[in-house]
Image (cartoon, rainbow, N blue to C red):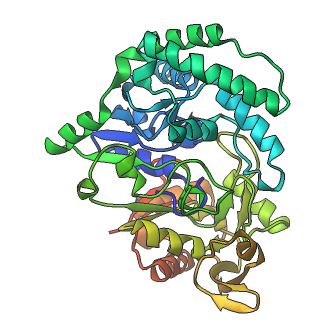
Amino acid sequence: MGAQWGDEGKGKVVDYYAAKADYVLRFNGGSNAGHTVVVGEKTYRFHLLPSGVLRGKEVVIANGVVVDPEVLLAEIASMEAAGFPVHLSLSDRAHVVFPFHKTQDALEERLKGALAAGTTRRGIGPCYADKAARFGVTFGDLLDPEALTKKLSVLVPLKQRLFRALGDEAPLDKDAILSEYMDYAQRLAGYVRDTSRLLNEALRAGARVLFEGAQGTHLDLDHGIYPYGTSSNCIAGAACTGTGVSPKEIGEIIGVVKAYTSRVGLGPVPTELVGDMGEQIREMGGEYGTTTGRPRRVGWLDLMLVTYAHMVNRFSRLAVTKLDVLSGIDPLRICFRYSIEGEETSEFPASMRRLAQAKPVYAEMPGWPRLSREEWRRIAAQGYEALPENAKLYLKAVEEAVGVPVSLVSIGPGRDETIEVA
C-alpha cells in the first residue's frame, strides 16, 4: 500500500516481491494508476496490468478495478511483443470505462473551479460514479450483447443530456460505441472469469497472493485529502472489498514510503519545496507522473502522512524507496508534527482549510555524500550495513516515528538496487 500520495515506487516493490508470489493482482483504481518497473536497461510502464506480469506470474484484475478495454488490450499487446506472456484473469464484476466517461471527466473537471481535483481525465471518477449509481456496465454485461445493448440504450441518452447541460453539443453515437465495445468483448472474453472464486480457491490450495495497491492512502476516497484524491479506496481494507477475499486471509501489509514527499494533482502539500531544492529533488528523482507526465510536486518527508497511513492500514513492514535521491543534501529535514493556528498537533486534519494552514514542524537530520550509481549498486550487493551511517539514521528515525520496521530499502530503479533488511 502507498503510505503517501501515490508515486511511492510501488511498481518496483511489487515486482521485487512478486518473485516469491504465485498470483499478483490489482484491486482498485483504473488506468489513472501508473506503475514503473525497470528490468535491466529497459523501463516498463503499467496502468492496468499488475507489475507481476514481468515475472511471468498469474495476474488478476479484480472486481474493484474499473477497466478501459482499449488501454488493457494495448498493454497486453505491448507485453507480448516484448516477450512477456500475459497470464491474465479479469473479473466479470469489474466495471467498464467508456469514451463518454472520459468526456464527462474533462467537462466536470473544467467546471469544478476551486473544487477541481486535478484528475487524469481518463474517465475513472465518472465510471465509479455510475457503478455507485447502479447503472454501470460490468465485464459480465460486456460479454452479453443483449445486456450491453439494453444498458447503453439508457446510458448514452442520459450522458448526452448531461453533456448538453454542461455545454457540450457533440453527439454521442450509441451504435458506434456498441460496435466498438462488442469487438473489445470478443477480444477479452478469454480472460474474463469469476476472480473471487479463483483467488479463494488458490488461497485454499496454499498459493501466495500479492495484492498491488494503486495510488496512495492520502488519495483514498474516504481517508484521503478529499476532494483532492481519487475515486476509489486505496487502503488495505479495499484489498478485501476489491477482490472478494476475506480479511482473515491477509498475512502482511507492507507500506511503501518514498524517502521524501511527492504528489501529482491539486490540494495542500505542507512540506512542499518550490525553490531550487525542490527542483533538485524532482530532477534527481525523475519526478514526473507515469500516467500524465506532469511534474510532481516534491517536498521533505512528511511523517504526518505516514503515521496516519499506518493508523488506517496497520502496516506490518515498511519499504522505503528512493533513498539514493537524497544523497548530497545536508542537512535533511523530516516533518514530525504540524503547527496549525499557532498550536502544534500530531493529528492529521480532515479539514482542507486546516491542512492548507498547516506549517510543518521539522527536525534536521545529517545528510550523506552524493554517491554514483555504481557505488549504490555495490552497497546494495553488500547489504544494509554498507549504507552510509547517516542514511541508516534517517531510516531509523522513520521506523521510530511510525512504529514499524523497515524491511526493504530501494536505492535505485533496478531490481539489483534493493536491500532486504534482516
Any part of residue 296 in sight: yes
Q: Is residue 65 above or below residue 192?
A: below
Q: Is residue 303 above or below residue 89?
A: below
Q: Quadrant of residue 55?
A: top left
**Most distant residue in the left direction:** 205
Instruction: Name the one closer to the observer, 51 or 338.
Output: 338
Residue 120 in the image, given as x and y percentages of width and height:
69, 40
Residue 311 in the image, given as x and y percentages of width and height:
45, 73
Residue drawn at x 69%, y 50% is: 286
Q: Quadrant of residue 267?
A: bottom right
Q: Quadrant of the C terminus?
A: bottom left
Q: Is residue 417 above or below residue 26?
A: below
Any part of residue 20 in sight: no
Residue 367 appears left or right of 398: right
Residue drawn at x 74%, y 66% is: 268
Residue 356 in the image, given as x and y percentages of width and height:
76, 72
Instruction: Name the one closer to the observer, 305 or 244.
Output: 244
Instruction: Name the one closer to the observer, 266 or 139.
Output: 139
Residue drawn at x 45%, y 39% is: 51
Q: Quadrant of residue 293?
A: top right
